[in-house]
């Protein structure tokens, strides 16, 4: 193969490796050989050949698609970057578009994979008296707009999260010398040791334990920018609490509790990719909740469980079925917390039919899009606290 194309394929592979795909020099040789053997009939054929060689797992498709669109297109976003790196790419216009979700991560990888021409440095003085620190910026930055390095820092911050030690009382009693109830059976048994000459009262108290946490997570295409890092949070949650159950759904429901119990997060995510077949697909909230209520609710929602429903509420099924399943889910748990990334927008309104159907059956409605909102969720997983968003009042205000 002649021309600049092999060199550009090498640059493209370096960008993918910087973005997180495990690619070696052999993959570049395989890609060039596959293109020579199959031929390039068009852009779709070129995409299919590179995708078949470079993508090894289903979850890598999102990064590959973002990198392919940015690297090989000729106009639009990142035009000047491509001109610096790729000899065959030339700027065609100055059209500006807002950066897509995940584009920052690919942009950083592209900068690292090629050598940009040096530019003269300009002296610039900044007054940082009213600026935020890097930690504060990282806490407030949206997960979808983070670079690869920032995602790694966010994952490290999530690993340091610790839940509050709030426990609830159960129906069972345990021996407690300071308890308010007298344990008559243990008292009589202890009195037999002395022949009844001395009676030492034994006491008991209700046992306390952490409530179960059940996470039902949407992994459809509209949630792909947030679902992976939320799985990191659930992995930490599973490691710190005994009774944590996780279910993933797109078009079907999958129980991944066992996979997330792995000590290594990379191994856990690899097991998830093999187990779950509907990553970044469509969304069927009603049918997925129906399967959960029918097959799993009695097993995992006992003893005052807290349910974390992680979805944007963009439902394609009928609202009647969704209403019935949401009502049943709320009545089966102690608290139902809806985590919605769309709530990060100040002008967000409940206009979608699925969102309006689900809100009346939710105890708390929370945004989940950055480290600050995730830390607030960690605090909220204890006892109910003032200042939480009441979904029913919010829905009434939105309608007004």
Image (cartoon, helix red, strand yellow):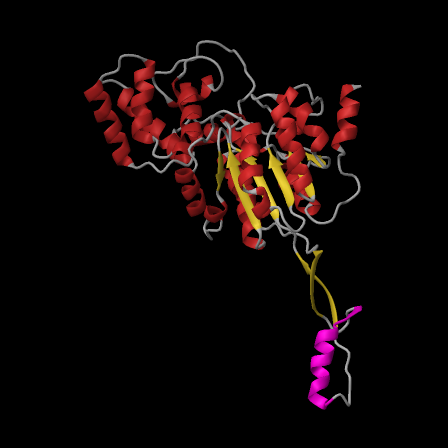
- Where residue 357 sits, quadrant-wise, is top right
**Observer able to see residue 125:** no
Magenta: main secondary structure = helix
Side (left or right) of 172 relative to 145: right
Vertical side of 171 occupied by 382: above or below: above
Q: In which quadrant is the N terminus drawn? A: top left
Q: Position of residue 259 (x, y in %)?
A: 45, 47
Residue situated furthest left in the rendering: 37
- For the C terminus, the quadrant is top right
Q: Position of residue 11 (x, y in %)?
A: 34, 27
- The spot of residue 143 in percent (x, y) is 57, 33
Classify residue 323 as left or right of residue 69.
Answer: right
Relative to the observer, which residue lies in front, 181 or 396? Answer: 181
Return the residue nearer the eye: 386 or 72: 386
Q: Nearer the viewer, residue 156 or 170?
A: 170
Q: Give the side of residue 127 with respect to residue 312, left or right.
A: right
Q: Is residue 352 visible?
A: yes
Residue 354 lies in quadrant: top right
Q: Nearer the viewer, residue 222 or 140?
A: 222
Please name the residue shown 51% across and 37% down the image: 248
Q: Does 313 sit above or below residue 134?
A: above
* Number of residue marks: 0
Q: Does residue 189 show up magenta in the picture?
A: yes
The residue positioned 56% from the left and 38% from the top of the image is 294
Q: Magenta part of the protein: which range?
A: 180-195
The residue shown at (26%, 15%) is 40
User: Was residue 50 drawn as part of the magenta stretch in this picture?
Assistant: no
Which residue extends farthest top?
Answer: 93
Percent x, y of residue 339: 64, 35
Q: Residue at x 80, y 42 (%)?
A: 386
């Amino acid at each position: 193969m002649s021309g600049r194309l092999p060199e550009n394929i090498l640059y493209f592979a370096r960008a993918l490796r910087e973005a997180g795909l495990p690619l070696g020099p052999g993959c570049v040789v395989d890609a060039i050989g596959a293109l020579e053997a199959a031929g390039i009939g068009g852009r779709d054929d070129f995409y299919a050949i590179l995708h078949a060689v470079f993508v090894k797992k289903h979850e890598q498709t999102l990064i590959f698609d973002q990198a392919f669109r940015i690297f090989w297109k000729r106009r639009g976003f990142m035009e000047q970057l491509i001109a610096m790196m790729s000899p065959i790419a030339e700027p065609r216009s100055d059209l500006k578009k807002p950066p897509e979700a995940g584009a920052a991560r690919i942009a950083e990888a592209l900068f690292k994979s090629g050598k940009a021409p040096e530019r003269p440095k300009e002296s610039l003085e900044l007054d940082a008296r009213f600026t935020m620190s890097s930690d504060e910026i990282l806490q407030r930055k949206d997960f979808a707009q983070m670079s690869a390095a920032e995602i790694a820092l966010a994952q490290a911050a999530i690993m340091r999260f610790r839940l509050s030690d709030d426990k609830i009382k159960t129906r069972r009693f345990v021996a407690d010398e300071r308890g308010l109830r007298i344990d008559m059976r243990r008292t009589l048994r202890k009195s037999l040791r002395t022949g009844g000459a001395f009676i030492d009262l034994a006491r008991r108290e209700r046992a306390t334990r952490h409530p179960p946490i059940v996470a039902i997570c949407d992994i459809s295409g509209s949630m792909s920018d947030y679902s992976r890092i939320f799985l990191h949070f659930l992995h930490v949650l599973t490691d710190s609490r005994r009774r944590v159950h996780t279910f993933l759904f797109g078009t079907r429901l999958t129980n991944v509790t066992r996979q997330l119990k792995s000590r290594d997060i990379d191994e856990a995510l690899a097991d998830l990719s093999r187990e779950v077949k509907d990553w970044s697909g469509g969304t069927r909230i009603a049918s997925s909740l129906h399967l959960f209520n029918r097959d799993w609710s009695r097993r995992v929602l006992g003893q005052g469980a807290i349910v974390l429903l992680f979805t944007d509420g963009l439902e394609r099924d009928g609202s009647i079925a969704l209403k019935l399943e949401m009502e049943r889910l709320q009545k089966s748990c102690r608290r139902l917390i809806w985590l919605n990334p769309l709530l990060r927008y100040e002008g967000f309104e409940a206009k979608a039919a699925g969102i309006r159907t689900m809100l009346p059956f939710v105890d708390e409605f929370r945004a989940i899009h950055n480290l600050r909102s995730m830390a607030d969720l960690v605090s909220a997983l204890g006892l109910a606290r003032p200042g939480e968003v009441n979904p029913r009042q919010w829905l009434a205000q939105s309608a007004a």
